[in-house]
Amino acid sequence: MTLALPDDRMDQVLLTEEQLSDAVARLGREIAGDYTGRDLVLVTVLKGGAVFLADLCRAVELPVTLDFMAVSSYGPQVQDAVRITKDLDDAIEGRDVLMVEDIIDTGLTLNYLLRVIRQRQPASLAVCTLLDKDARRLVDLPIEYRGFAVPDRFVVGYGLDLDGLWRNLPYVATLKDDIWETWQ
Ligand code: IMP
């Protein structure tokens, strides 16, 4: 069945609602298997990660806590420094931290956050990303849990936005190339 896309700037559905929920269930099982008996906190970066985290945390059948960070970039270039605009609410020293990301693109944002979090001496620190746009990676990052490898296209939906829009789409769609090129 072909879904009617809500905007003509979108190209096609890349991941359907069913593919996303299958991946969330699989990742939830893997995480629950690996963290049984541990003190797990799931951390995501607002706003994009909130949709994935909301589904993922319900697929991890373990007692977990949730925490949130927010960041902004100092400038428009990917190399520009990242600034934390909302820090974690809780201390993480001695706890098992899993960073939950909607997408890893260049990896620079997550690389910075992992450094900050590591300094707080968690018992362990790992990464779960729904989407991995690995063709654009500028830094090497360990990714323990991955939903999908995605091509070098701009995607929206399921938390991901263009100028704040389309985070609430239940699927992930690619944008048309000319829209993506003007965004870069
Ligand atoms: P980074 O390049 O890995 O540091 O990614 C930074 C952020 O850019 C991600 O967390 C997303 O918020 C955003 N981003 C990267 N690629 C896309 C995309 O295809 N769609 C929407 N947002 C994206």
Image: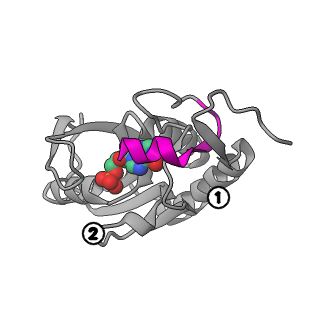
Question: Which residue type carries mark 1?
Answer: Arg
Q: Secondary structure at mark 1?
A: helix
Give the numbered dot on residue 139.
Answer: 2
Left-right relation of 114 to 170:
left
Q: Nearer the viewer, residue 100 or 38?
A: 100
Q: Do the CB atoms of the residues marked 2 and 1 lie less than 8 Å apart?
A: no
Which residue position holds label 1? 26
Q: Is mark 1 within 8 Å of ligand 1?
A: no
Please tell me the numbered disc located at residue 59: none
Amino acid type assigned to the residue bearing label 2 in the image: Val
Q: In the image, is 99 to the left or to the right of 108?
A: right
Q: Is residue 28 magenta?
A: no
Q: Position of residue 60 (x, y in %)?
A: 56, 49
Taking depth in this image into account, of 131 and 175 the one nearest to the observer is 175
What's the residue at 23%, 39% (across, down)?
A: 71
Q: Is residue 63 visible?
A: no
Image location of residue 22, percent across then percent down: 70, 52
Question: Residue 148, how many percent across, how many down?
Answer: 57, 61
Q: Residue 158 or 165: which is nearer the viewer?
A: 165
Residue at the location (49% across, 45% down)?
A: 178
- Whether residue 173 is in magenta: the answer is yes
Q: Sequence-wise, which precedes: disc 2 or disc 1?
A: 1
Q: Residues within 10 Å of mark 1 (few under 14, many from 20)?
A: some
Q: Position of residue 4 (x, y in %)?
A: 76, 32
Q: Could one spot residue 71 in this view of the protein?
A: yes
Determine the secondary structure under disc 2. loop
Label 2 to label 1: alpha-carbon separation:
27 Å
Quick one: quadrant of the N terminus? top right
What residue range appears in magenta? 169-184
19 sits left or right of 154 in the view: right
